[in-house]
Image: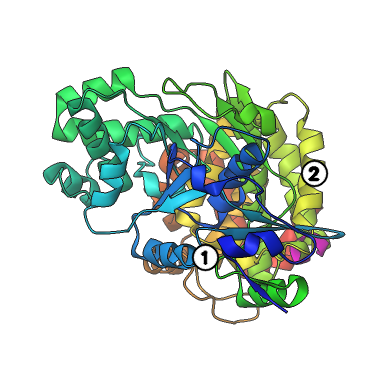
Amino acid sequence: MRTRLSNSALAALPEGISAPGYDRSALGPGILHVGMGNFHRAHQAVYADDLLRAGGDPAWGILGAGVMPADEAMREGLAAQDHLYSVTEMGPQGDDVRVIGAMAGFLPVTPGHGPMIAAMADPAVRIVSLTVTEGGYFVSAQTGGFNAGHPSIRADIAEPERPTTVFGAIVAGLRARRAAGLAPFTVMCCDNLPHNGAVTRAAVCGVARGQDPGLADWIEAEVAFPNGMVDRITPATTEPRRAGLAAGHGLDDARPVFCEPFRQWVLEDNFPAGRPALETVGVQFVEDVTPYEHMKIRMLNGGHAMIAYPAGLLGLEFAHDAMADAQVAGFFEKVERTEVFDVVEAVPGATPEQYLASLKDRFGNPRIEDTIRRLCLDGSNRQPKFIVPSIEDNLAAGRPVPGLALESALWARYCLGVDEAGGAIAPNDPDWERLTEQAGRAKRDPLAWLELRDVYGGVADHPGFRESFARALDALYARGVRAVLAEYLG
C-alpha cells in the first residue's frame, strides 16, 4: 500500500519514514527563498526542518519563490501535497527517508514577479535567500565584477517596476521596504560561488545604481549580504528513483529529493534583521568563510570537473564509475595533491589531505548515481569559478599547472561534441553552440580555445599556461584520452 504525501498523511507515514512532528499551521514566512530546486530542498530546508523539530521558532518558515517558468511547475507539484516533500539520504548501507515540513508556502511565479516583490515588503520576511545556479549572477570573467551591460540587467534598469531577474526583484522589494520605513531584509546567497555574498551584493547594488543612485547608497549602507559555503551532493531526481521510493518505502511523492548523507553549511554571522538559531543544528558561523569555500569549491567542485570530462569522453555513466576507473581516479587525486593542495588552506577539522579522503568516499558512493553528464553540465559557467582560480593562483606563485591545463583541455575536447568512441555528446551547456564551434577551431589550433575570455580572463595570456594547454589538447587529439592520462600519471 502506498501513502500519498499530504498533511493528512503525516500521522500515518509508512514505517521508517520520519514526520516533521511540529505544528506546520504555525509557520511564518521568516525566510523567502528563490529557487526551490533539489539542492535547496536537500540543504537549507533540511537545516530549517531540523531546527523546527528541535523546538525552534516557527516564525522562520520558508516561503518559496521562483523566477523561471519551470518554477511554476515546481510550485504546483508541491502545493498539491501541502508543500511537503521527502528527502532520501542514500548511504552506502541503505536509505534514511524523512518528510520535510519547513515550507510555509510557495508564491505564484508570474512575469514581473509581483507576488514575490509584495512578499518582500512584508516585515515578517527578514531573510531573502537564493539558489539560482552559479551562472545566474552576471559576473564578467574579464573584470571579475558585475556585468551591468547584460541585456537582462539593462532591461531591469529600464523597467524597475517589472523586473525579469531575481536581482531586479530584490531591488524592488528593498525599495518598497525603504519607502515604508521598514528595516531591510538580509540577502543570503546559497549558491556555489567564491565570496557568494559579495557577488550577490554587487548584482543587487549594480541594478539599484542603474535605477536610483540614492537607493543604491541605502542598500550598500544598510543591507547585509553574508558570505556562505554550502555542500551536499544532490543528483537529479529521476523517474526510476521516484518509482523506487514508492515501491521500496511506500511513499507517493511528486517532488522527492535524493542526496548523500553528508552536508555542511558555513556562514558569516551578519544578520542585522535577526536569524534562526541554526548553530544548534550544525551550521557553522564564522568570521571569514574564505578558507572553507576555497577548500570546497576548488577541491570538490573542481574535483567533479576533473573526473567529469575524461569520464564523459570515455563513456562512463556515473561518478562512482569514474572513481572505479584507475586512470580517471588517479588523475583526480594527482591534480588535487600537486596543484590544488597549494591553493587551499586547512580549516578547523579538515586538512586538505583529510578533505581529499572524504571526497574519494563521497564521489565513490555507488548509491548516489550522480551522472557524469550532470557533472559536465554548464562548464562555461563552472570552469571560471571552480578551475580557473586555482590556475591563476598557481601561476601567480610561479608554479606550473600541467594537470589543470589537461583538465581544461579535456573540457575543450568534450565540447567538440563527440566522445572517444565516436558517439555524439548531446548539448550540455547553455552556450553549447558557441563552445562546439570554438572546439572545432581548437582542434586545428589549440590556442583558439583560450579566446574564450569570459572563461579564462587573464590566464589565457600566460605563456606557461598557453604552452601546457596547447600541448595537452594536441595530445588528446593525437593519442586519445587513455594514452594522455597514462603519460600524465607517468
Residue type, numbered disc 1: Gln
Q: Residue at x 36, y 31 (%)?
A: 201
Q: Does the image show residue 474?
A: no
Residue type, numbered disc 2: Ser
Q: Residue at x 43, y 41 (%)?
A: 29
Q: Position of residue 273 (x, y in %)?
A: 41, 23
Q: Is residue 1 left or right of residue 185?
A: right
| CA gap, disc 2 and disc 1 | 36 Å
Residue stretch in magenta: 321-325
Residue that label 1 marks: 81
Vertical comparison of 357 with 447: above or below? above
- Is 133 one of the magenta-colored residues? no
Q: Position of residue 337 (x, y in %)?
A: 76, 39
Who is closer to the viewer here, 486 or 240? Answer: 240
Location of the N terminus by quadrant is: bottom right
- Is 324 one of the magenta-colored residues? yes
Depth-wise, is mark 2 or mark 1 nearer the camera?
1
Q: Position of residue 378 (x, y in %)?
A: 48, 58
